[in-house]
Image (cartoon, helix red, strand yellow):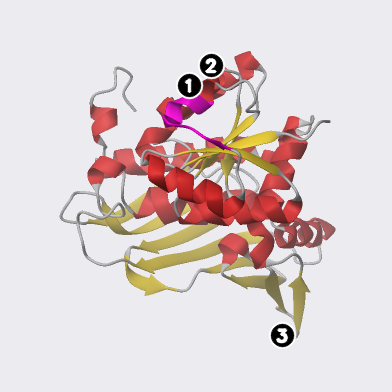
Amino acid sequence: MDKLNWAVLGTGVVANQMAQAMQGVGCKLYAVGNRTHSKAVDFADKYGIEKVYDDLNDMFYDDNVDVIYITSPHNTHIDFIMKALENGKHILCEKSITLNSVELEKALKKADGKNLVLAEAMTIYHMPLYKKLQEVIRSGKLGKLCMAQMNFGSYKEYDMKNRFFNRNLAGGALLDIGVYALSFVRMFLNSCPDQITSQVKLAPTGVDEQAGILLMNREQEMATVTLSLHAKQPKRGMISFDKAYVEMYEYPRGQKAVITYTEDGHTEEIVAGATADALGYEVEDMEQAIAGHPELMKLELTEDVMKMMTRIRKDWGLTYPEEEHATEKI
């Protein structure tokens, strides 16, 4: 397969990390577009990118672009996704891929009709550590999966105008950091939870500032998720089996897990991959998906996670302006 031409939409922190990752794995970052043109020019100069769009929307119509990486705020994703798909572009979109399941299903239908790969940029699905850990689980040595506990807490300045608390930019803990915890849960549970209950504390803007979520699936595997935007927590994941439990820190880009065996308390370390290479693994899998292996992007898990988040926000009565004006309600 010829080398794919990537375009990046946005020039923020994660876009810079992705540009470096692409350089590291030998992918071709061909073009960049940004709402502020001068930032796109600076980004292109920094990474040796040959094409800068005067209008970021021009990337959707550029025949030289094969894949678009979208890094804009959550609430803008669906419009960019639909434009890109309509014009024959594969898409890797930052989390959360859409605001809700209605938007995601609309995008998936379009991608399927166009025979294009649409995927969420969820590092968890691509880390070698979790692929190795799933092999250990399948071996049966850990026993039956019983429950998982996930924490993710950021400390964001209590500024209601920044994107984390801004309702007009689809702020809130669930879509920004909760998506990691729920993706981790869904990846290891044997089916999607169908019983969900939660508590939420809303910020003055009306978005979710912190939340506790309890989930259970038909196998009666359980998970608890604790999220916060103004109280630091470790990015800690724990999966409990009837013969052992597994702990991971910095799990969104994890490289080490520690297994503690119930019978005698001895521990075993599993180390695989590198945190620093997380986005590189993601890009490599995306290119393989386009080459004929779409299963690598775990889209079915993305769908399940979006269904959970949509249901949770519906229970909270938390909507965003785009949803309130949409013809098809969540």
| Residue at mark 2 | 86
Q: Quadrant of residue 76?
A: top left
Q: Which residue type does callout 1 highlight?
A: Lys
Number of numbered labels in the structure image: 3
Q: Is 263 situated above or below 187?
A: below
- The span from disc 1 to disc 2 (Cα, nearest Å) is 5 Å
* Tag 1–tag 2 contact (CB < 8 Å): yes
Q: Is residue 193 left or right of residue 74?
A: right
Whole-percent x and y of residue 9? 49, 38
Whole-percent x and y of residue 33? 47, 37
Q: Is 140 situated above or below 7?
A: below
| Residue at mark 1 | 83
Q: Which residues are magenta?
A: 51-59
Q: Is residue 312 left or right of residue 286?
A: left
Q: Which residue type does callout 2 highlight?
A: Glu
Q: Is residue 176 visible?
A: yes
Q: Earlier in the sequence, mark 3 or mark 1?
A: 1
Q: Quadrant of the N terminus?
A: top right
Q: Relative to the observer, which residue lies in front, 182 or 96?
A: 96
Whole-percent x and y of residue 60? 52, 24
**Residue 52 within the segment the image draws in magenta:** yes
